[in-house]
């Protein structure tokens, strides 16, 4: 069947019931996800951008009509935002649905897209974001943070106790300067890693680059350095914070003093 040659687009906004809202789960196949925190106790909404492709204008409009978006409660304070084809998808159709969410940030946030970027600012709760192909940008605090993409840059500003950041192809930038005791892993297969730490950030730091240098200007106790490796106690020490790249450099930078 032919590839889509004609596209149509539609934008709509839907309210989200913020009463008792404690968690959001967002899923799309092709499209971006953007979350912007609003003041506590305020309203919540999602702007939905739908793009549908077909081999003719009529075909594209038929595909658009078949895109069914859901914004619905799932119990226990969770709201789910997703979409699916309302009828069997024709081989020549394509669909791209993006979500821009505005809601109070004191919640758990779980978002996944197959092809698209994810941006989150700012969440005070557990955050999990996954993209198969797309960059990730996250600001979060207090809860855990898991951010994973297969192809794209990861840029995180974080103040909580446990972080996992990973990409297969791309740079990773992690601002942990607001953290106290922190543990987890920061990894990429192909790309540089940049980590910022503050005067109160503490962990047992374990850095390793298979093909690249490791540099740290933060004070480390009981440090050990070898080719492509650096470890030591950052601040008061504590649990392990692993920083690994297969091809690229590692830079740990202190923001204090």
Image (cartoon, rainbow, N blue to C red):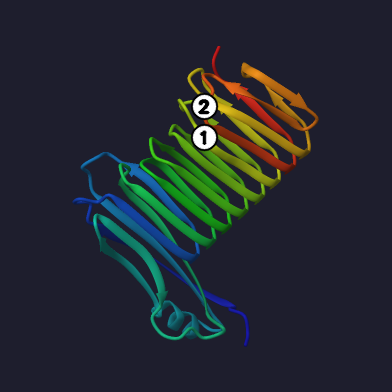
For the image, the number of numbered tags is 2
Give 109 or 183, whichever is nearer the viewer.
183
| Pointers 1 and 2 in contact (C-beta within 8 Å) | yes
Q: Residue at x 54, y 84 (%)?
A: 56
Give 55 or 253, whichever is nearer the viewer.
253
SS type, badge 2: loop
SS type, badge 1: strand
Q: In the image, is residue 233 above or below residue 158?
A: above
Q: Is residue 20 left or right of residue 8?
A: left
Q: Residue at x 63, y 33 (%)?
A: 194
Q: Residue at x 71, y 23 (%)?
A: 224
Q: Is residue 87 left or right of residue 236?
A: left
Q: Where in the figure is residue 2, as x and y percent of width and height?
A: 63, 85
Single out the mark in the foreground, 1 or 2: 2
Q: Is residue 153 left or right of residue 63?
A: right
Q: In the image, is residue 18 above or below residue 215?
A: below
Q: Residue at x 41, y 74 (%)?
A: 84
Q: In the image, is residue 199 above or below residue 132?
A: above
* CA distance for labels 1 and 2: 8 Å
Disc number for residue 44: none
Disc number for residue 238: 2
Q: Which quadrant: the C terminus?
A: top right
Q: Residue furthest top?
A: 257
Disc number for residue 183: 1
Q: Residue furthest left?
A: 19
Q: Is residue 99 left or right of residue 79?
A: right
């Amino acid at each position: 069947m032919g590839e889509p040659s004609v596209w149509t687009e539609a934008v709509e906004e839907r309210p989200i019931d913020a009463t008792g809202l404690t968690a959001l789960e967002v899923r799309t196949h092709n499209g971006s996800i953007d979350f912007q925190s609003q003041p506590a106790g305020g309203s919540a909404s999602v702007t939905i951008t739908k793009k549908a492709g077909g081999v003719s204008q009529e075909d594209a409009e038929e595909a658009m009509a078949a895109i069914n978006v859901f914004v619905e409660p799932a119990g226990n304070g969770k709201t789910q935002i997703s979409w699916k084809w309302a009828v069997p998808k024709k081989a020549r159709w394509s669909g791209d649905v993006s979500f821009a969410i505005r809601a109070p940030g004191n919640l758990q946030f779980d978002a996944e897209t197959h092809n698209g970027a994810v941006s989150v600012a700012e969440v005070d709760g557990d955050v999990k974001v996954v993209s198969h192909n797309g960059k990730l940008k996250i600001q979060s605090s207090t809860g855990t943070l898991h951010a994973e993409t297969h192809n794209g840059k990861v840029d995180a500003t974080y103040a909580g106790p446990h972080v996992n950041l990973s990409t297969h192809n791309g740079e990773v930038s992690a601002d942990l300067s607001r953290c106290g005791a922190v543990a987890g892993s920061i990894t990429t297969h192909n790309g540089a890693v940049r980590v910022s730490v503050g005067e109160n950030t503490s962990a047992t730091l374990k850095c390793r680059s298979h093909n690249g240098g490791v540099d740290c200007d933060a004070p480390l106790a009981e440090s050990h350095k070898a080719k492509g490796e650096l470890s030591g106690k950052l601040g008061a020490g504590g649990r392990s914070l692993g920083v690994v790249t297969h091809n690229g450099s590692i830079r740990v930078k202190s923001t204090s003093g």
